[in-house]
Image: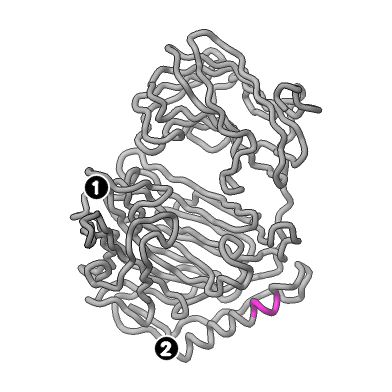
Amino acid sequence: MKNFKKTISMITVLALTSSIFAFAGCNNGSNQSEIDLLPNPDVEEGTPAPEIDGYNLLWHDEFDGTLLNESIWSYDPHQPGWTNNELQEYTTSTKNVFVKDGNLVLKAIKGKNDKGNNYYTSGKVKTQNKQDFMYGKIVARAKVPEGQGLWPAIWMMPTDENYYGIWPKCGEIDIMEVLGSDVKTAYGTVHYGEPHAEQQGVVTLENNSFADSFHDYSVEWEPGEIRWYIDDELYLTVNDWFTCVEGADEEPYPAPFNQNFYVQLNLAVGGTWPGNPDETTDFDNAEFLIDYVRVYQKDSYDTNVKKPEKVFRQADETGNFIHNGDFAVAENLDDTEDWYFLLFEGGEGSAEIKDETMIIYTEKEGTVDYSVQLVQPELPMIKGKNYRVTFDCWADEERPLIVCVSAPNAGWIRYLADTKFTATTEPTTYVYEFTMRDKDDNNGRLEFNMGNKGSTATIYIKNVRVEEIDELTPSEE
């Protein structure tokens, strides 16, 4: 393990904090153009962290000892239900948090309370007020547990959560989250705003899972951009965040990500996203293993950054915002451009474009609506405008599915509400209209959600349109 001497740590934190107050209220034309960062020249003996070109090692923990290094980490106890309707109590017990065989182990344990009901304990640690920093490259190598209701995470929160306001105004950087029920998929997310906004990247493995072996999860956090990697592969870049009190002017960019943050590691049990454990969850192996955490910084960072202007997609000559809505082109459905096909939470299937038709084959329907999903993002949604969604759809046998226009960057709110309809065996044209009533968004997303509907019948979709209209049809209003 490596660690600042106490005096050097205090100087670093104070220097960064003073920089926050120097420019947090300034506009992008400020003369403050760089932050000078102090490297960490004084580390304890132990396993060295590798050098990274262009960076200085700030702090790291290789978990080589037998005890948690409390000069870096603090236990973070919380009662059940503290957040996200999670079931676990985070404790300071060495049964839930311990160092073994070169790994930090966060273990979830299932027991009984005094009423005989299931009671769960688990581990959470953080570096708040010990190893806080602003900007850098954070690298963590970890292996996640598998099991319904388990939810391991590596994430960051601001040291002073009230500086821009409580969550989500303060900002949050999620380096990695995996649901134990779907360990082939990992998420990187950033939260900010008011109203709550988020941007998320997803990586899905084809031939193995994140529970099979250790993987490197990293974030490069700079004044005007945050980038997410898994095993050095870039999968998400974000540079257009904001924060404000709802109804007020936005704080000067790059707020809220221009303040000290800290790292935290936890293994949650249950909650609104992963759902609760069931009889299949193996708590004997409910261990989140972290091999190391390393934080690097550059010598300096240019803080004279400007928020990129939003670019809004233009409609084609027919007024359609959808690309390849007639399916005249057989495109790659695995990438994130135009149409793409997604599977989550037990969903299994495939999709293809054939004879100017999108065909979705479902082998397993999964456990949630979006277990089998076809989407097209980057649709322009302008506050006060009216829109019409039109498509033809049928299936091999009568079956339900859901259509909506969602907001991936605005807390997944719905511009067109989740609308359930029943596809019959005859091609039918479906038309839905709505008024956009929220903040302008250049990343509305048309979704067809086909999971967890009691059917695996093959679905056919043609002639998809999203267009702006002058006014809603009276019956739709």
Point 37% across, 46% down: residue = 275
Q: Check if mark 1's residue and mark 2's residue have beta carbons within 8 Å.
A: no
Q: Which residues are magenta?
A: 19-23
Relative image position of residue 167 (x, y in whole percent):
56, 62
Vertical side of 360 occupied by 21: above or below: below
Q: Nearer the viewer, mark 1 or mark 2?
A: 1
Which secondary structure, mark 2?
A: loop
What amino acid is at disc 1?
Thr
Left or right side of 352 for 118: left
Crowd tier of the residue under label 1, counting other residues whose Cα lies within 10 Å: few below 14, some 14–19, many 20 or above = some
Q: Which mark is residue 5?
A: 2
In the structure shown, which secondary structural element does the residue marked by tag 1 occupy? loop
The reply to whether the magenta stretch includes residue 358 is no
Q: Is residue 212 visible?
A: yes
Q: Residue 456's spot in the image, x, y percent?
A: 38, 21
Give the position of the C terminus as an image quadrant. Answer: top right
In this picture the colour scheme is: one colour
Residue most extreme to the left: 284
Q: Work out whether residue 435 or residue 5 is closer to the camera in this orientation and state it.
A: 435
Question: Which residue ends up furthest to the top in the rendered image?
Answer: 426
Q: Is residue 21 magenta?
A: yes
Image location of residue 253, percent across then percent down: 69, 64
Q: CA distance from mark 1 to mark 2?
A: 43 Å
Mark found first going from the N terminus, 1 or 2? 2
**Image: 428 above or below 259:** above
- Residue at 75%, 32% in the rendered image: 386
